[in-house]
Image: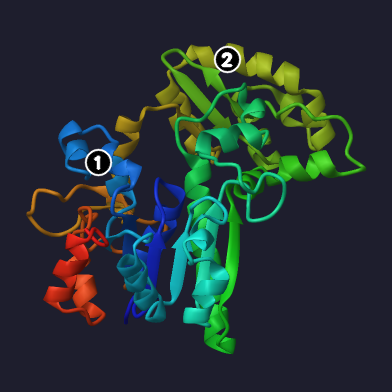
Amino acid sequence: MTRPFEGVRVLDLTHVLAGPFAAYQLAVLGADVIKVEPVNAPDATRGRGLDDQRNAAGLGLTYETQGGNKRAIALDLEKAKGAEVLRRLIADSDVFLENYRVQALAALGFGYDAVQQLKPDIIYCSLTGFGQRGPRASVNAYDNVIQAASGIMARSGDQKTAASYVDYSAGMNAAFAIAAALFRRGRDGKGTHIDCAMLDCALMLAGPEVTGHLSEAAGPEKPAEAGIGCYDTADGKLMLGAFNFRQNKRLWDLLDEPALAALETWPDLWGAATVMRQVLARKLLSRSAQDWMNIFHEAGIPAERVRGLDEALADPQLAHRRLLQRPPGDSGRETTVPVAAFDFLEDGPRLDSPAPAFGEHTDEILKGIGYSSAEIDAFRSEGAVA
């Protein structure tokens, strides 16, 4: 069997995290992804990460995280020959993915209408902070400001999460939308313009809170159930996840609290939340977080110690998953990265090659679309490619 997107060519005109991650998810499933960067403006993440030597080489670990399985070309779209190359690439591609400011590519002659003229069935995906229309369409955004703008940060004590969850959820949504559009194109032969906004993606992640806030019949906000919370133990913190009534009963039976174990409605649980939290805060101090975790797991109650990333990555469970992969080879550029949060029985997501150097495949790609070595040298001498 072949991987799902083998034979699909994606032009990846994206930078930073969300757009490159969307293209990466297609690449690990077999798509031929060509990363197109401006000659004088490499992807900023090439210089970011914990390895200064790699940063200086334009292969920062942040870039590497969503750069594998791609080929790289550098073009100056303001030069006639650079634009000519991109037009030729478009004619032989299936997906055009971009996350530039609204109308930025249109000003260079590569908005959706112009690209569709070159390839009528193209899947053109625009990934921006606030979408293609509306009063904030032209406002630039990154993960942190969308966390603030979405209202989620305010609900989290005005703290930004340490992970760029908006970027990666936006990338996943864009990849899913592209997959859906390709599936539909296989039936009716038609392309489309996908408008993916990071703000929308953030609010999707807060779906129940959004629905509750908008509901005309909603009452005042309910207190969080005590069984879903983080508590101090004798040697660390424990996150409890006793969500349903069966788990709640088992929790309070274990803690020898029959009155609390008998509660069987949501209003009862919400009404007793304060008392429950007080009891849990007192009783969980009597044992270590690991002891409580073992006890609760034995009873079928979700619970986990709060642990650092180093410990999470050392979890033996990951040896049974294919999340973390290292591309084959010995060039010295290979590193272990997350690949995809799912797997198939066979021919699933796979990391075949590390993230490419800036313009690493320019000559290969240009020759593949019919340019001669002499033409490529001329393009390079005038700065149209790098």
| Residue beneath the point at 24% across and 61% down | 385
Give 96 or 322, whichever is nearer the viewer: 96
Relative to 200, residue 160 above or below: above
| Residue beneath the point at 32% across and 66% down | 82
Give the quadrant of the C terminus: bottom left
Q: Residues within 10 Å of mark 2 (few under 14, many from 20)?
A: some
Q: How many marks?
A: 2
Q: Locate residue 21 relative to residue 266 in the image: left or right.
A: left
Give, as a three-letter code, the residue at label 2. Answer: Lys
Q: Where is residue 241 in the image (x, y as percent from the top left)?
A: 58, 35
Give 262 or 350, whichever is nearer the viewer: 350
Q: Locate residue 226 relative to residue 103 in the image: left or right.
A: right
Q: Residues within 10 Å of mark 1 (few under 14, many from 20)?
A: many
Numbered label attached to residue 60: 1
Please tell me whether mark 1 sits on a helix, a strand or a loop: loop
Q: Where is residue 309 in the image (x, y as percent from the top left)?
A: 35, 32
Residue 247 shows in this picture:
yes
Q: Name the residue under label 2.
A: 283
Q: Where is residue 279 in the image (x, y as percent from the top left)?
A: 66, 15
Q: In which quarter of the image is residue 247?
A: top right
Q: In which quarter of the image is residue 328?
A: bottom left
- Distance CA(mark 2)–CA(mark 1): 47 Å
Q: Locate residue 56 relative to residue 4 in the image: left or right.
A: left
| Residue beneath the point at 56% across and 23% down | 159
Give the quadrant of the N terminus: bottom left
Relative to 23, residue 372 above or below: below
Q: Position of residue 334 (x, y in %)?
A: 16, 51
